[in-house]
Image (cartoon, helix red, strand yellow):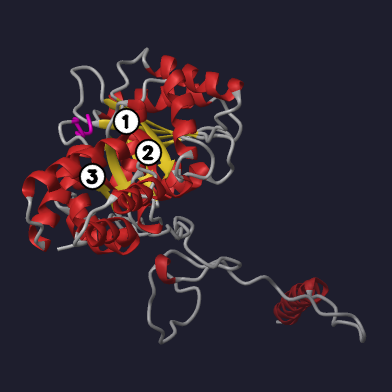
Amino acid sequence: MEIVILAVVIALVVILGAGGLVVGSRRRKQLPPPRTGTPSVTAPPAEPHVGDEAEAPRDEERRTIEEVDLPGATAAPDAVEEVQVPPAPVIEQPEPTAGRLVRLRSRLSRSQNSLGKGLLTLLSRERLDEDTWEEIEEILLTADVGVAPTQELVERLRTRVRVLGTRTPDELRALLREELITLLDPELDRTLHTESHEESPAVLMVVGVNGTGKTTTTGKLARVLVADGHSVVLGAADTFRAAAADQLQTWGERVGARTVRGPEGGDPASIAFDAVKEGIAEGADAVLIDTAGRLHTKTGLMDELGKVKRVVEKHGPVDEVLLVLDATTGQNGLVQARVFAEVVDITGIVLTKLDGTAKGGIVVAVQRELGVPVKLVGLGEGADDMAPFEPGAFVDALIGE
């Protein structure tokens, strides 16, 4: 019996010892508590599993990527800054040229009253003696008709009045009108040759001395041609005057005509050549070439004008060489005309400022001097104040209704 009790006691001791070892082992494995002043270490958060929300959903309206403003950006990457394009110039429709001189007759008549009305007054005298005929001659000479044309007109008037016998106002007006139209030579061809050729456009050169208004005349002539249904290219061959090319280009833009220009001080012949070349490429009807103003006493400049014409003729013929004359210069314009005619073959005259002078007889004188017709006249500052010259309308403006 004692032996059994001893065995039980030993078994209990063994079991209790084993349990103490286990508890001691567990206590040695526990981490010591943190010391005061030592920062605690926070364990990293567990990584989310597939399907888990990163954070609790917020009650906000969802936006597309295009609607989100990126940091430091003011516009979407593919946005293009809008460029301000200047408005295109308004293309004008020039006034028709048919009958334009008739519509401008009032301007012409105001400046020419001394010629027409003076002649009618003298012819209406009861007695036409030698003094009266001398006064008639003086009026004609003052109007720059010229000596030879004046003598011819007076002689015909003398004969007609002597044969006519009676001289009522209407008869005298009809007589004077007929003789003045004859003096202007209505048989001269005043047509502007602007019809294009098979392989090249018509070429018109505008020449003259400084200050006669060549560039303005070229611009107004472009309007005349556009009004008559022609397509036009302008050549700014006046490279010596800084504003000439800009001025011509402005005239062209107003009627939709392209202007060919070059550097300031460039070769005029080269620019004229390029203008005709451009006219051929565009299939234009006519090319207008504005040349630099030349003093008719400067031989070198005049020779250069001949060079421009020769270079242009490599493309095709020059159809018109229009000499611009200021009507207010009177007989001095004839001197200029002679020199220009020696360098280039003048085909027509453009008389500017005819509304500002009483020297309308220059029309007769310059035609007689050069043997070429006055084809255009300028009667004001307006864009459409240039008109094809019509002898009948011109004479009607001189002597009134």
Q: Where's residue 307, x and y in %?
A: 49, 17
The answer to whether residue 225 is seen in the rendering is: yes
The magenta segment: 188-193
Mark 1 vs 2: CB contact within 8 A? yes
Q: Quadrant of the C terminus?
A: bottom left
Whole-number angstrom distance, CA of label 1 to CA of label 2: 9 Å
Residue type indicated by callout 2: Gly
Residue in front for this viewpoint, 351 or 14: 351
- Is residue 228 visible to the viewer in this orientation of the structure? no
In the image, residue 20 above or below residue 123: below
Numbered-mark total:
3
Q: Mark 1 sits on what residue? A: 368
**Residue bearing the label numbered 3:** 388
Query: In the rendering, which numbered label is found on residue 146?
Result: 2
The reply to whether the C-beta atoms of the residues labelled 2 and 3 are less than 8 Å apart is no
Which amino acid, by three-letter code, is at mark 1?
Answer: Arg
Instruction: Indicate whether residue 189 is drawn in magenta.
Output: yes
Q: Residues within 10 Å of mark 3 (few under 14, many from 20)?
A: many
Magenta stretch encompasses residue 99: no
Instruction: Residue at 58% x, 40% y: name it.
Output: 241
Q: Secondary structure at mark 1?
A: helix
What is the x, y in percent for residue 29?
79, 71
Report the predominant secondary structure element of the magenta stretch: loop
Decide: few, some or many residues near mark 1? Use Cα within 10 Å; few <14, some 14-19, many ≥20. some
Please state the horizontal and vertical placement of residue 130, each as a whole percent of the image: 30, 49
> Residue at position x 49%, y 46% from top?
246
136 or 105, which is in the foreground?
Answer: 136
Query: Which of the two labelled residues, at mark 1 and mark 2, occupies the earlier sequence position?
Result: 2
